[in-house]
Image (cartoon, rainbow, N blue to C red):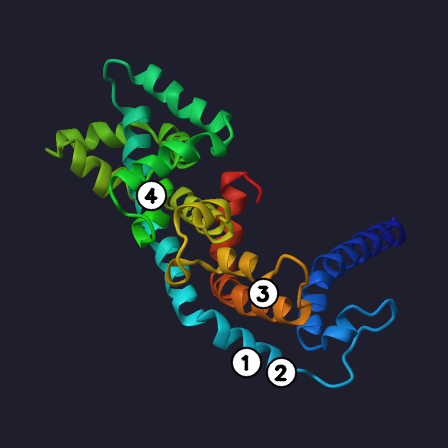
Amino acid sequence: MKKKTFLSHTLIHILLILGAVVMVFPFVWMVLTSLKTVTESTSMNPYVYFPKVFQWENFITVWKNNHFIRLYFNTFAMIVLRVLCAVFFSATAAYAFARLKFPGRDFLFGIVLFQMMVPVQIFIIPQYLMVDFLNMRNTIFALVFPGLVSAFGTFLLRQFFMGLPKELEEAARLDGCNIWRTFWKIMLPLTKSGLVALAIFTALFAFKDLMWPLIVNNQADADTLSSALSKIQSAYTVNYPELMAASVLAIWPIMLIYIIFQKQFIEGIATSGGKL
């Protein structure tokens, strides 16, 4: 029996290691390509993995040509503001839908669910027209605008609020707390895991967002990392080492954030039951 258990554990670990290697290999290939010459990166020899001489100049070139300091600022300003807005507005809306009774509650929540069911591309034109009407194109506000409210966050946090016992609100009401204090002081802290999960999802979706920054911002100083990377590729040729070097410069901050907050990241994903 012990031998059978040992073999099963060994097989599981081998499969997990192979899966990890498959996941890590594209990142290793990206780093190695960023240190090659153009000739090496387009070589037809499939066994040329390592560059003969590390071309660190690729990083210097893309750093100078793409103003990465500005790109970092735009991207992380967008992420932070989207996370703050999504968490706050989603939490307040979710609490209202889950714990308060008011006319049209179910109908309004149905509209929220409908927004989750349709492709996000449907909302691009109305959102663009609103941003253009406000004369806010090529600004941080334009990048944040689609993430001010999150239908997914409202649905997610509503499930957390619905799982809390009603006795907590009744006790708070007896102690003289109004609706806002009950929400802010008692109910909201109990949904910490849901808030963390929503913040993680919002940050990742904002970091990966490509279409909206390309549409709403057409000036170089208003680009994000994702939109700037898409513009590095020319119409006829692609300098793959420089493109990979720019990709390395673009992803290292989010990887560092993941390493620092790895525990909260895993707990948030496990608690929400979602996947990326």
> CB atoms at circles 4 and 3 under 8 Å apart?
no
Q: Which label's residue is closer to the chain start, 1 or 4? A: 1
Q: Are marks 2 and 1 in contact (CB under 8 Å)?
A: yes
Of the residues under marks 1 and 3, which one precedes in the sequence?
A: 1
Q: Quadrant of residue 78?
A: bottom left
Amino acid under label 3?
Ser
Q: CA distance from mark 1 to mark 3?
A: 13 Å
Query: Which percent across, then down, holds residue 20?
Result: 72, 58
Q: Which mark is residue 160?
A: none
Mark 1, secondary structure of its residue: helix
For label 1, the residue is 60
Q: Earlier in the sequence, mark 4 or mark 3?
A: 4
How crowded pointer 3 is (Cα within 10 Å; few <14, some 14-19, many 20+) is rated as: many
C-alpha span from label 1 to label 4:
33 Å
Q: Is residue 136 above or below residue 49?
A: above
Q: Secondary structure at mark 4?
A: helix
Tag shown at residue 56: 2
Q: Mark on residue 145?
A: 4
Q: Residue at x 37, y 49 (%)?
A: 143
User: Nearer the observer, disc 1 or disc 3?
Assistant: 1
Q: Residues within 10 Å of mark 2 (few under 14, many from 20)?
A: few
x, y percent for residue 248: 58, 68
**Residue drawn 50% across and 40% down?**
272
- Local crowd at mark 4 within 10 Å, few (<14), some, or many (≥20)? some
The mark found on residue 247 in the picture is 3
Residue farthest to the bottom?
53
